Image (cartoon, rainbow, N blue to C red):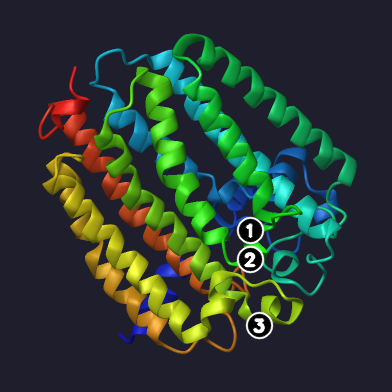
């Protein structure tokens, strides 16, 4: 099987037709960020509307970050299940809010239009008429208020570092698309994601759950941050023809298509290399070396990045014109899942746990 055929096979596994009924629509939205084919976004049931509008399909990236933190923390002295679950809820709500704020900011700035990828790979919550701008604004306020309450509760229990993590996350979330910084437009959005999904989420959740922060956690957070950054690189490679003319200088626009693909392969390789290094220095338990089982998929993904992008999507492909982003997301699910599984085995059987993470 050719690399393109293998890639098509792996990405189209997510494309099973939706089952009938509302639950089928919810499951399809969670899998593809889209409503079932042929459905008018304006007539969707409220749950499906919000699953699509918040891009709930990508929230597992944050859930995995929280699971990495929790499995590193669960055997540490001072671990609290209630505080951990509260912190996990906080980062998922923050990611949800970030997705909505990005759409609001890019629409206000004139970047999101009917011909821009955001409105092509899924219904744009505003441009499609699915939701009113006021509804999205109220959702942002509500989500931020919920995270504020969570921050206060955690800070009262764990101290001022919780506030630092929370405020830094909010600032980076706003700065990603909003003026005056607009990090995405200045080639810094990828660094934003690396910091947010790596050290910020994992270290912040760990601290909230335990009340201390050994150096091992900082090191352990790097591999997963690299993994998430590869998804954004893939998405921004897909969007080069749209971003370059508008002056949106994402890192792939700055690097150019060929070098951006090479940099993405380097990020993927770095995930495996830093995982091994973290095990070697005692920051991650040795069972996480299960991520090596994703190396065959890495080979397929790397070949896809070296191959021409298809001229048209496979039949039923729901997120076109995104292509490399979908491939990167499949890899994140596989490699991230194996990372979490390795951490779970280490926590359950108490094997290979770094000294600084033991109770």
Query: Separation of disc 2 and disc 1 at Cα?
Result: 5 Å
As drawn, the label of residue 44 is none
The spot of residue 253 in percent (x, y) is: 59, 78
In the image, is residue 147 above or below residue 215? above
Q: Residues within 10 Å of mark 2 (few under 14, many from 20)?
A: some
Q: Earlier in the sequence, mark 3 or mark 1?
A: 1
Q: Residues within 10 Å of mark 3 (few under 14, many from 20)?
A: few
Q: Nearer the viewer, residue 101 or 315?
A: 101
- Viewed as shown, does residue 245 lie left or right of 210? right
The spot of residue 149 in percent (x, y) is: 64, 18
Q: Nearer the viewer, residue 339 or 318?
A: 339
Q: Circle 3 — which element?
A: helix
Check disc 3 and report the residue beneath it: 241
Quarter of the view holding residue 269: bottom left
Is label 3 in contact with label 1 (beta carbons under 8 Å)? Answer: no
Q: Residue shown at 42%/61% (left/top)?
A: 330
Query: Separation of disc 2 and disc 3 at Cα?
Result: 17 Å
Is label 2 in contact with label 1 (beta carbons under 8 Å)? Answer: yes
Check disc 2 and report the residue beneath it: 186
The spot of residue 189 in percent (x, y) is: 57, 59
Check disc 1 and report the residue beneath it: 183
Q: Residue shown at 88%/55% (left/top)?
A: 129
- Viewed as shown, does residue 327 lie left or right of 269? right
């Amino acid at each position: 099987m050719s690399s393109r055929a293998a890639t098509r096979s792996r990405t189209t596994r997510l494309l099973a037709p939706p089952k009938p009924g509302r639950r089928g629509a919810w499951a399809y939205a969670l899998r593809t960020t889209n409503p079932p084919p042929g459905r008018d976004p304006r007539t969707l049931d409220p749950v499906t509307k919000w699953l699509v509008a918040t891009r709930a399909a990508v929230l597992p990236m944050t859930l995995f970050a929280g699971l990495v933190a929790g499995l590193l923390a669960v055997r540490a002295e001072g671990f609290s299940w209630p505080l951990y679950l509260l912190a996990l809820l906080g980062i998922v709500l923050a990611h949800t809010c970030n997705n909505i704020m990005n759409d609001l900011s890019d629409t206000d700035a004139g970047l999101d239009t009917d011909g821009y990828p955001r409105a092509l790979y899924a219904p744009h919550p505003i441009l499609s008429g699915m939701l009113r701008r006021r509804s999205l604004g109220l959702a942002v306020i509500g989500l931020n208020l919920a995270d504020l309450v969570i921050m206060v509760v955690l800070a009262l229990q764990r101290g001022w570092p919780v506030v630092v993590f929370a405020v830094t996350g909010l600032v980076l979330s706003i700065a990603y698309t909003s003026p005056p910084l607009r990090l995405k437009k200045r080639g810094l959005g990828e660094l934003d994601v690396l910091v947010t999904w790596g050290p910020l989420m994992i270290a912040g959740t760990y601290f909230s759950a335990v009340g201390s922060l050994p150096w091992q956690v900082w090191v352990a957070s790097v591999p997963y941050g690299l993994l998430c950054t590869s998804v954004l690189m893939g998405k921004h490679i897909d969007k080069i023809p749209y971003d370059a003319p508008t002056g949106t200088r994402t890192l792939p626009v700055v690097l150019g298509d060929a070098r951006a693909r090479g940099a993405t392969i380097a990020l993927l390789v770095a995930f495996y290399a830093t995982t091994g290094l973290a095990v070697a220095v005692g920051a991650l338990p040795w069972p996480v070396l299960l991520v090596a089982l994703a190396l065959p998929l890495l080979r397929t993904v790397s070949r896809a990045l070296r191959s021409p992008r298809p001229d048209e999507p496979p039949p039923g492909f729901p997120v076109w014109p995104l292509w490399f982003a979908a491939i990167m997301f499949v890899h994140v699910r596989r490699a991230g899942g194996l990372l979490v599984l390795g951490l779970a085995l280490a926590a359950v059987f108490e094997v290979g746990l770094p000294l600084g993470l033991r109770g």
